[in-house]
Image (tube, coloured by chain):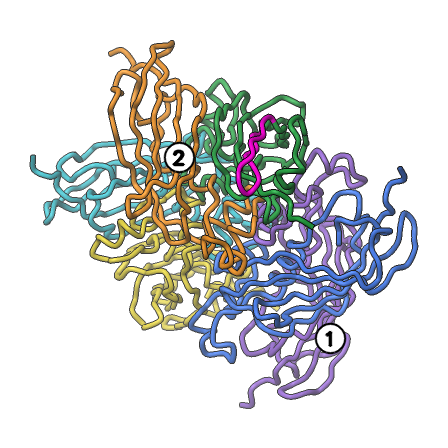
Chain colours: A blue, B purple, C green, D orange, E yellow, F cyan
Amino acid sequence: MFDCYYDELEIGDHRSFRGVTITEAHILGFAGVTGDHYVLHTDAEYAKRTPYGQRVAHGLLVLSCGAGLIPLEPGRVVALMGLDEVRWSAPVFIGDTIHPEMEVIHKEDREPGGIVTLHETIKKQDGEAVCMATVRALVARSPRP
Amino acid sequence: MFDCYYDELEIGDHRSFRGVTITEAHILGFAGVTGDHYVLHTDAEYAKRTPYGQRVAHGLLVLSCGAGLIPLEPGRVVALMGLDEVRWSAPVFIGDTIHPEMEVIHKEDREPGGIVTLHETIKKQDGEAVCMATVRALVARSPRP
Amino acid sequence: MFDCYYDELEIGDHRSFRGVTITEAHILGFAGVTGDHYVLHTDAEYAKRTPYGQRVAHGLLVLSCGAGLIPLEPGRVVALMGLDEVRWSAPVFIGDTIHPEMEVIHKEDREPGGIVTLHETIKKQDGEAVCMATVRALVARSPRP
Amino acid sequence: MFDCYYDELEIGDHRSFRGVTITEAHILGFAGVTGDHYVLHTDAEYAKRTPYGQRVAHGLLVLSCGAGLIPLEPGRVVALMGLDEVRWSAPVFIGDTIHPEMEVIHKEDREPGGIVTLHETIKKQDGEAVCMATVRALVARSPRP
Amino acid sequence: MFDCYYDELEIGDHRSFRGVTITEAHILGFAGVTGDHYVLHTDAEYAKRTPYGQRVAHGLLVLSCGAGLIPLEPGRVVALMGLDEVRWSAPVFIGDTIHPEMEVIHKEDREPGGIVTLHETIKKQDGEAVCMATVRALVARSPRP
Amino acid sequence: MFDCYYDELEIGDHRSFRGVTITEAHILGFAGVTGDHYVLHTDAEYAKRTPYGQRVAHGLLVLSCGAGLIPLEPGRVVALMGLDEVRWSAPVFIGDTIHPEMEVIHKEDREPGGIVTLHETIKKQDGEAVCMATVRALVARSPRP
């Protein structure tokens, strides 16, 4: 949706995006960049003794990979205004493939285009939702011909 | 705050955590893990022509590094319930040092301890807030002696 | 060009793509993945005594980043048939920003669409060509309505 | 061969080099450095539905790892003149081990030594060729005693 | 132990720390940063023909991960004085989980606190010791109230 | 020295190896793999207020990069027996270039060749020693013709 101009988006528009398989390398890479090496993500022996039974991807890794899978074109999104109601509903394990879906739920005119509110759902390969968020962005109007 | 039990946390408790300097390696590492190589983060020539004048760290990198700087001890946080009102108030540039601060703003008893609501503010070296979020977590009660 | 079908491409079509600034993290990352830690790329003291006067990005890093900047859509490119006449015409230094340009130079019908030959030029921020290659790909015809 | 001087290389010289096992970490690392996160490399669910049946390493990752396995000594190769006829003949999957072989096919005197043309073949653990290329390099003559 | 002041440590104090599961991504990451891509660590076919039968983590990766798992608080350790008798007693394979244990074996007063000698043992999930070292550090006295 | 057989090494043999420039990407990469994100290495604001005045590379990163710069050939080193007297004598800063030097100080026959004791010194671009260690390895005898 972030490759569209404000006037190209309608309430109810829904798109599903490509996915990514979460690997051990994603978890170590994210831990390395953020410093979050919490044992639930990095220690298989510890994770085995939790209700999850295995290592779990960081919640923010899932949210960030979801965001990274949504194409962004220069000149459309003027500013990301914020995230609300970020919720994690199921764990993502090593080997799971996740992909985001987005739906436009609100539009409000504002210069230089308008504020678009979207509902994002990140799903696993079996269709189960693992993370939801409400995203608000200021999006530009398409250039006049 | 995530190295504390529910009964060890009081409304108004405030803590400041250690910082991290955001480098080009953080931006490439985060882009690589998430797939978000948007030009504002990775192309210095493009960034030069934006109002920012230089490359900007991903908003979710800032949020994720902020989270990674907060110590987490096994047995305290039972579940991260969600994030609300995530807002980015200023850009983080390469070379900026950010650190998070957390304040307990609400407590509500629930088994096996209670839900703690915290306000997180991530600040730059000059004290300017760059990212804010409300964090809710289910935290366990301290083990009986 | 790799987000187009065979029938959407014409000889003479030319496109310029977004760029990326080559950082020390790119060089270390590429050295790490490929095992090529040659001193010209990784040792500033050695590089200082060469005609380049400073560390130089790996030629294959430049070629690979150029390729990575060209959008690829599933269903178009059936197979990358090969690269010919890969030439490096100028060094890329840390801090340089490179972007690829592509031009269709030949088309030849073949199932399930045709073979497209493209000339790729990777340029620096000042317009200087740093790497050229001829790329041949088997591309599918657009789906019938 | 790039640890030899021009006069130490003869047409017909053939060498086989050490190998490397391609892992998920190579694919994520290469995708991260180059920005090429194409689903055939990174999304196991997508890849399952292609003729390959599983994720495939990037062609340029295979070529680059092959190059990285060939020892390079300062003072021998004066300039890499180019690559020709780069062809990929079989996919490389996660867990495959590849190694390069090189053969000198042409020599042509030129200051400060000569141009050496080599045929490179990258093979999998079962001996199948996965990538071929012709490499031309300007190589120095051995220092006079 | 490096989150304690000199006067808080007693000879015989023993602590066991959290663990980490060594993955292919650790080995590639460590090889990439250090340049050590030795075939025993990176080539599964080569490793299969050694007495180990599989790829082995670098000894210094094991030692470094062991060190990274020990919490360090600013203001306690003034200087790491050195390592002695670093010995590797068993190989660490991909998928093994290692954790360090530390015991205080000597104390010697010196400004601004004293020199603490510790015996570190890094163990695998089955309790087998894989690496031992003697660590000496100059540690500060706790601040007077 | 680890590309030689036992009988090819003599007491007093001394070699200097190629170097590497330590970058921010090395520090983040090493912190990421090992989990050691201590503020002296990663927080420029904190480091500014220490006697070092700037971020310092991890001691084990310096030791590990030193080891990684020494060529290792299969069939020579049978086992790395241990490290002794590892000492860090000066800080390594971002931008410093380090290289190792090795000297054979002892030989003792043992099957299948002998134990070689070497003194390693890692130096900075200005010749200052930053890390020293004594290395003992079991090395094989050269194959009989």
E25 drawn magenta: no
Label 1, residues with CA under 10 Å away: few <14, some 14-19, many ≥20: many
C110 drawn magenta: yes
Residue E99 screen position, x and y as percent: 40, 67
Q: Look at 48% across and 27% down and name the residue there.
A: C84
Using the image, determine if residue C123 lies above or below residue E109: above
Chain at tag 1? B
Who is closer to the viewer here, F76 or C60? C60
Using the image, determine if residue C12 lies above or below residue A108: above
On residue D67, the disc is 2
Residue C38 screen position, x and y as percent: 41, 32
Residue E136 screen position, x and y as percent: 38, 57
Using the image, determine if residue E68 lies above or below residue F95: below
In magenta, the rendered stretch is C105-118
Who is closer to the viewer here, D115 or E102? D115
Chain at tag 2? D
On residue B117, the disc is 1
Look at discs 1 and 2 and give the one toward the viewer: 2
Tell me, yes or no, whether the two marked residues, 1 and 2, touch with CB atoms within 8 Å: no
> Which quadrant of the structure image shows residue F120?
top left
Q: Secondary structure at mark 2?
A: helix
Residue type of the residue flagged with mark 2:
Ala
State the predominant SS element of the stretch in magenta.
Answer: strand
The reply, left or right, for residue E92 in relation to residue A29 is left
Who is closer to the viewer here, E134 or A110? A110
